[in-house]
Image (spheres, rainbow, N blue to C red):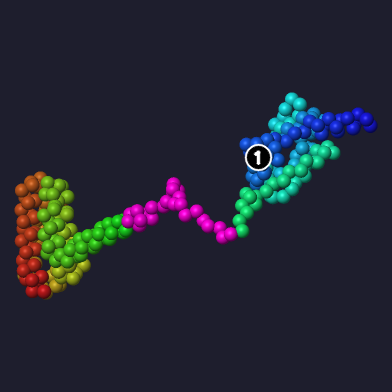
């Protein structure tokens, strides 16, 4: 019984409290919310589980095992008087708010000194960048629409002529391209369906359209000559392809002058 009392007495004598916020004792300054509190428990007769249980009202930051005991770092975010019981010894810790230190009976006047630093969101710059993107997008869209409108405003003959001029007569598929361009032009002018049809089928379709009578012979001759070059296996020279393009252009001019100009 006596040994137990001595053990308790030694335990009480070896517990010391160190406040890690500039001063070492609670009497020298207040303990505020969130302050780190360091307890040195110099006794090997108590377990970590007992320490954790005794400090359950606090947030334990660290428990360091020493040669002669433990060093515990803790804190609390609740104000008021808290009692730590280790063994049969009670330790009182009073935690206060920083607002408690401000005692004013008059009207509180805020600090009118301009504050420096602080990261300010550059709203004006962001607004200008967004507006710039919006304006550029609008200009690009407008230019695109103008180009598209100009393309759409081209007459069938203009489209026909431009397409023929872009044909590379040195290419082996030049005659095929010119035939397709001519079919498109005839179809647009006379409102018939000839794309995908053979030369004979095209002439059958053309002969059924009264307005094509002035051009039927020229169309027939050009298509016949084109088929000869494409399917006979003859070596067609670049100059001959050029002549085919000029002849087709002349047929287009004749149709344009009598059909499109009148329209």
Answer whether residue 115 is magenta in the image: yes
Q: Is residue 43 above or below residue 243?
A: above
Q: Residue at x 81, y 32 (%)?
A: 13
Q: Residue 250's spot in the image, x, y percent?
A: 5, 61
Residue 186 visible in the current orientation: no
Write down the quadrant of residue 142 in the picture: bottom left
Answer whether residue 211 is magenta in the image: no
Q: Residue at x 64, y 42 (%)?
A: 35
Q: Is residue 124 above or below residue 86?
A: below
Q: Residue 135's spot in the image, x, y percent?
A: 28, 59
Q: Residue 80's spot in the image, x, y percent?
A: 72, 50
263 sits left or right of 24 in the view: left
Q: Is residue 228 above or below residue 51?
A: below
Residue 29 visible in the current orientation: yes
Q: Residue at x 44, y 52 (%)?
A: 114
90 sits left or right of 248 in the view: right
Magenta span dominant secondary structure: loop
Q: Residue 252's spot in the image, x, y percent?
A: 9, 63
Q: Which residue is mark 1?
A: 36
Which quarter of the rendered picture does the C terminus lie within? bottom left
In depth, the one of 27 and 11 nearer the eye is 27
Circle 1 packing at 10 Å, graded few (<14), some (14-19), many (20+), is some
Magenta region: 106-130
Q: Secondary structure at mark 1?
A: loop
141 sits left or right of 3 in the view: left
Which quarter of the rendered picture does the N terminus lie within? top right
In depth, the one of 138 and 95 nearer the eye is 95
In depth, the one of 195 and 263 nearer the eye is 263
Write down the quadrant of residue 147 in the picture: bottom left
């Amino acid at each position: 019984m006596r040994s137990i009392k001595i053990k308790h007495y030694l335990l009480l004598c070896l517990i010391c409290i160190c406040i890690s916020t500039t001063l070492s004792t609670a009497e020298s300054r207040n303990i505020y919310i969130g302050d780190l509190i360091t307890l040195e428990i110099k006794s090997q007769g108590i377990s970590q589980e007992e320490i954790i249980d005794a400090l359950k009202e606090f947030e334990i930051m660290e428990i360091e095992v020493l040669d002669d005991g433990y060093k515990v770092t803790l804190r609390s975010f609740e104000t008021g008087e808290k009692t730590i019981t280790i063994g049969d010894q009670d330790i009182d810790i009073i935690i206060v708010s920083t607002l408690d230190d401000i005692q004013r009976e008059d009207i509180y006047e805020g600090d009118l000194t301009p504050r420096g630093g602080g990261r300010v969101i550059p709203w004006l710059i962001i607004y200008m960048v967004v507006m710039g993107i919006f304006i550029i997008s609008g200009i690009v869209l407008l230019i695109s629409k103008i180009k598209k409108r100009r393309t759409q405003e081209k007459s069938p003959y203009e489209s026909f002529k431009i397409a023929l001029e872009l044909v590379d007569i040195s290419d082996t598929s030049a005659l095929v391209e010119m035939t397709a361009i001519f079919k498109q032009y005839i179809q647009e002018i006379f409102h018939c369906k000839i794309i995908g049809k053979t030369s004979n089928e095209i002439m059958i379709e053309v002969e059924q359209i009264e307005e094509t009578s002035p051009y039927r012979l020229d169309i027939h001759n050009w298509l016949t000559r084109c088929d000869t070059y494409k399917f006979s296996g003859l070596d067609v020279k670049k100059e001959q392809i050029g002549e085919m393009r000029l002849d087709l252009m002349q047929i287009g001019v004749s149709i344009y002058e009598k059909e499109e100009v009148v329209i």
